[in-house]
Amino acid sequence: MKPSSGINRWPLMIACLGSLFLVFSFWSAYQAATRSSAVTDRHYYSHGLRYNDTLVEQKAAESLGWMPTVSVDGHTVEVRLTDREGRPVSGCQGHIVLLDAGVTVPLAEDDASFYRAALTPGLQGEVAARLEISRDGARISRRLILNL
C-alpha cells in the first residue's frame, strides 16, 4: 500500500495570491479614476524649470529683508511691504494667484509700500492663494489662506 499523502496546498495559495493581486489592481484603478489630482499647480513643470532662478530671486529678497504684511478688507487684499528697518518698499510689481481657481489678480501700488488687489465678489470662505512680489531681480513669494 501507498502511504497517504497530504493535500497539496501550493495551487490554492497561488490562486489566493493571484486573486489578491487582481483585487488590489482593480481597487487601484478605481481610486485613480475617481479621485481628483492632488496637483495644485497646473504649471508645475515650467516652475520646476525655473527653480534655480527662483531660488536666486528669493535669496535676494531675503537679503533685502522684505517683510509683507497682508490684510483682507471685504474682497480687497492689502499688502504692506517693508524692509528690515521698517522703511517702505515701493516700485514693485506683484500679483496674487488664487490656487483653487487658477486666477491671477494683479497688485496695484496705491501708496509707498501699500499694494492692493480687488478679488471677485463671488469668493467666500477660506481661499488658498500665493502672493508674489518682485523688483529689480528680487522676488518674494508667500502662501496665504484668505478668509473672505
Image (spheres, grey):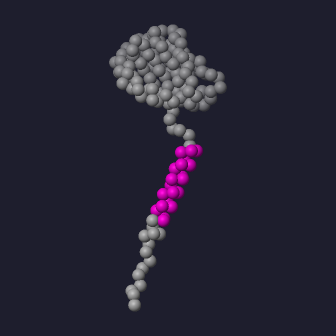
Is 27 colored magenta in this rendering?
Answer: yes
User: Residue 125 appears in which quarter of the rendering?
Assistant: top right
Q: Residue furthest front?
A: 1
Q: Which residues are magenta?
A: 15-34
Is residue 6 inside the magenta stretch?
Answer: no
Q: Residue at x 59, y 18 (%)?
A: 118
Classify the position of the N terminus by image quarter. bottom left
The percent coordinates of residue 42 (x first, y second) are 51, 30
Q: Name the residue: 36% across, 24% down.
A: 52
Residue 8 visible somewhere in the drawing? yes
Residue situated furthest right in the rendering:
122
The image quadrant of residue 7 is: bottom left
x and y, in percent, of residue 14 in the image: 45, 65
Identify the residue at image location x=58%, y=28%: 101
| Residue 29 coordinates in the image, percent (x, y) | 54, 49
Q: Residue at x 43, y 75 (%)?
A: 8
Q: Which residue is at the front of the view, 5 or 141?
A: 5
Horizontal placement of 27 versus 48: left or right?
A: right
Q: Using the image, determine if residue 111 lies above or below residue 9.
A: above
User: Does residue 84 show up?
Assistant: no
Up the image or down, 17 lies above or below 48; here it is below
Camera-side residue: 44 or 134?
44
On the picture, is 116 further left or further right than 134?
right
Q: Main secondary structure of the magenta part?
A: helix
Query: In the rendered view of the protein, which quadrant contains the C terminus?
Result: top right
Q: Position of residue 38 (x, y in %)?
A: 51, 38
Q: How many marks?
A: 0
